[in-house]
Image (spheres, rainbow, N blue to C red):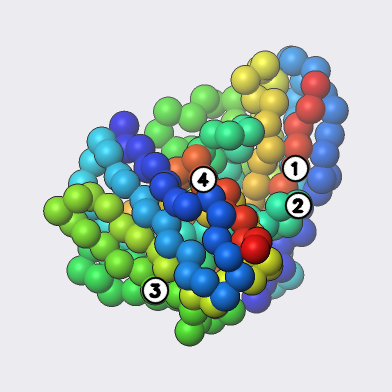
Amino acid sequence: AIRITQSPSSLSASTGDRVTITCRASQGISNYLAWFQQKPGKAPKSLIYAASTLQSGVPSRFSGSGSGTDFTLTISYLQSEDFATYYCQQYYYYPPTFGGGTKVEI
Amino acid sequence: QVQLQESGPGLVKPSETLSINCTVSGGSISSYYWSWIRQPPGKGLEWIGYIYDSGNTNYNPSLKGRVTMSVDTSKNQFSLKLTSVTAEDTAVYYCARDPTGGYSFDYWGQGTLVTVSS
């Protein structure tokens, strides 16, 4: 299965900060990468698919970029509600696989 | 707004069968692919498989032989059965919607913890 290496595993930030999370795939996956946000006890929320396309309703401070093996999720201006764990997922190769997560803490 | 809600037993004994339901509200179960994904405590997410509204299924080879999924369109519900469970099957189990069968998920349930223990 394709390995997705996500970094960092955790980070500390303040509201208003710009935050960048990266995912690296062990093989090229074109742009078949999604990003999710998860808060404790809540359903994961889909943020981005196709590496850079925002799901409907997702604030524009979230953006995604990358293609091939290297991908980035950027939160341009961190808000209090953005403190959560973020996951990436590839869906180019079968079976789909996930990164290990990045916990964004205050 | 589409919502998914898992319901499960919480505790299952080793060697028995784990059964979880996912009820879809705010939208139809028809014309979508419905996946199960799990996350053992402290570990990563693992896709288990999907079912289409017609009943067609696709299971992760890592679990094949132990997994069965079913769908009840009249109840807007789909289900997961995992047989011969061990402690390694202890996890939070999520259901999720895949709009195209391309393994990209747009809506998720909040998950249900199933613990395998005697």
Q: Which residue is mark 1?
A: A102
In the rendering, at what x and y percent does residue A13 appear?
82, 24
Marks 4/2: CA distance?
A: 15 Å
Marks 1/2: CA distance?
A: 13 Å
Q: Is disc 4 in contact with disc 1, using a CB cutoff of under 8 Å? A: no
In the rendering, at what x and y percent does residue A50 appear?
50, 52
Q: Tell me which amino acid carries mark 4.
A: Gly
Looking at the image, tell me whether mark 4 or mark 3 is earlier in sequence order.
3
Q: Tell me which amino acid carries mark 3.
A: Thr
The mark lying in front, picked from 1 and 3, is 3
Q: Are marks 4 and 1 on the same chain?
A: no
| Residue A51 visible from this viewpoint | no
Q: Is disc 1 in contact with disc 3, using a CB cutoff of under 8 Å? A: no
Q: Is disc 4 in contact with disc 2, using a CB cutoff of under 8 Å? A: no
Marks 2/3: CA distance?
A: 26 Å
Give me the residue at 37% from left, 42% from top. Answer: B4
Looking at the image, tell me whether mark 2 or mark 3 is earlier in sequence order.
2
SS at badge 4: loop
Looking at the image, tell me whether mark 4 or mark 2 is earlier in sequence order.
2
Which chain is disc 1 placed on? A
SS at badge 2: loop
In the rendered structure, find residue B42 and report the number of the disc placed on it: 2
Marks 4/3: CA distance?
A: 19 Å
Question: Which of the 4 image quarters holds residue B69?
Answer: bottom left
In the rendered structure, find residue A77 and report the number of the disc placed on it: none
The mark lying in front, picked from 4 and 1, is 4
Q: Which residue is mark 4?
A: B111
Give A65 or A92, whichever is nearer the viewer: A92
| Residue B78 visible from this viewpoint | yes
